[in-house]
Image: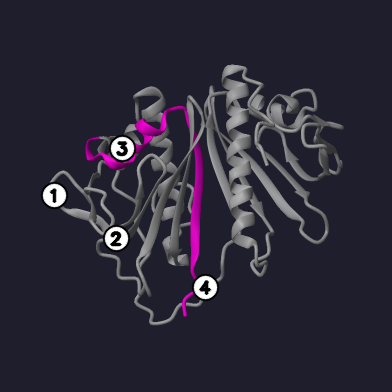
Amino acid sequence: MMKKTMFVYPIYIATTPEKLWEALTSGAITKKYHFGLQVQSDWQEGSAVKYLLDDGRITDHGHVLKCEPLHLLSFTWIMAGDETPREQPTRVTFELQKMDDSTVKLILRHEELLETDFVYDDNTFEGLNNGWPALLSNLKSLLETGRTAAHISRLGKWKTIKTNRKRVELVMDTQIITKFKIVKPTNEVFEAIVNPEKIGNFWFSSSSERWEKGRTPTLRYNEYDAEVVIHVLEVEENRKIVFAWGGNDQETIVTITLKELDKTSTIIEVNESGLSEDDPEIINKMIGQKEGWVYTLTCLKGYLENGVTTLRASLVF
């Protein structure tokens, strides 16, 4: 039996549930952000779902499993030309959670995946782990600004690595990778993280000291009456921060890398590794950590780009 995994990607969008739902279900809108593909379905349970190119060719198809307008949409997903041996089709679910009158949290879950569905290359849209973040970032841009990134909208869709082997032994990848674009230079993004006078504007309430290699700052959340000690393992100014946290029995390693796009923009990537594949709660923990990093980087983006300091510590448990 092949080992299955899933891809989960939450994103916060400044829009309404009505507008987001329309963007997910209207072919005229998906064409603008979904690699040029137009979705087609009446969205009744059991009905067909198709994603089509301009010439009518079907690139992906499936059937509606569940449809709760403005809340949840789930359907099977089969990629045309996929020769990978599978026990059953993959499953895509969009869950919409209204945060307030102007923000919706969208959670994408793509389940029943195999390791061959992932491509570990930062410079491609191939692989579901690269395609979905690009697609959902484009959706966010469309709904918030009315614009999309041409290099995402016009490129061909992502691909799956194919295999003709009868049996594939797979190991779950428990890395959690989160990427954001922040319209600020790398030195400002770096300083916001390592400087104890700035971290309270978007993340923890306080840091006991500046983050430097070999130090062990104490990070405190006053709002949750909680604190954690991290061990800073590596620091490259304006480029990389590596630290360990979580304690001996569940310690994970977090690597934050900063890549300069131009003099005014930075790609920040957070990679957290070390979660145990054998943990019976591994899926829930990975989802929780992924949501946490998306939220943290959203707060960082809001702080650096717009001076917003009230987003942090808003999660209710």
Q: Which one is earlier in the sequence, the residue at label 2 or at label 1? A: 1
- Looking at the rendered image, the disc whose residue lies closer to the viewer, 2 or 3, is 2
Quarter holding the C terminus? Answer: top right
Q: Which one is earlier in the sequence, the residue at label 1 or at label 3? A: 1
At horizontal 44% and vertical 49% (from top left) the residue drawn is 130
Which residue corresponds to mark 4?
170
At horizontal 58% and vertical 24% (from top left) the residue drawn is 302
Q: How many residues crowd around disc 1 within 10 Å: few (fewer than 14), some, or many (20 or more)? A: few
Q: Please, what secondary structure does the residue beneath circle 3 have?
A: helix
Q: Please, what secondary structure does the residue beneath circle 2 have?
A: strand
- 277 displayed left or right of 143: right
Would you identify the image quadrant in which residue 208 lies? Answer: top right
Q: Is residue 6 magenta?
A: yes
Q: Residue furthest left?
A: 55
Q: CA distance from mark 1 to mark 3?
A: 17 Å
Which residue corresponds to mark 2?
79
Q: Position of residue 314 (x, y in %)?
A: 66, 31
Q: How many residues crowd around disc 3 within 10 Å: few (fewer than 14), some, or many (20 or more)? A: many
At horizontal 38% and vertical 28% (from top left) the residue drawn is 143
- 100 displayed left or right of 161: right
For residue 56, the mark is: 1
Q: Residue furthest top?
A: 307
Q: Marks 2 and 3: CB-CB under 8 Å?
A: no
Residue type of the residue flagged with mark 1: Gly
Magenta range is 1-28
For residue 153, the mark is: 3
Q: Is residue 188 magenta?
A: no
**Colouring of the image:** one colour
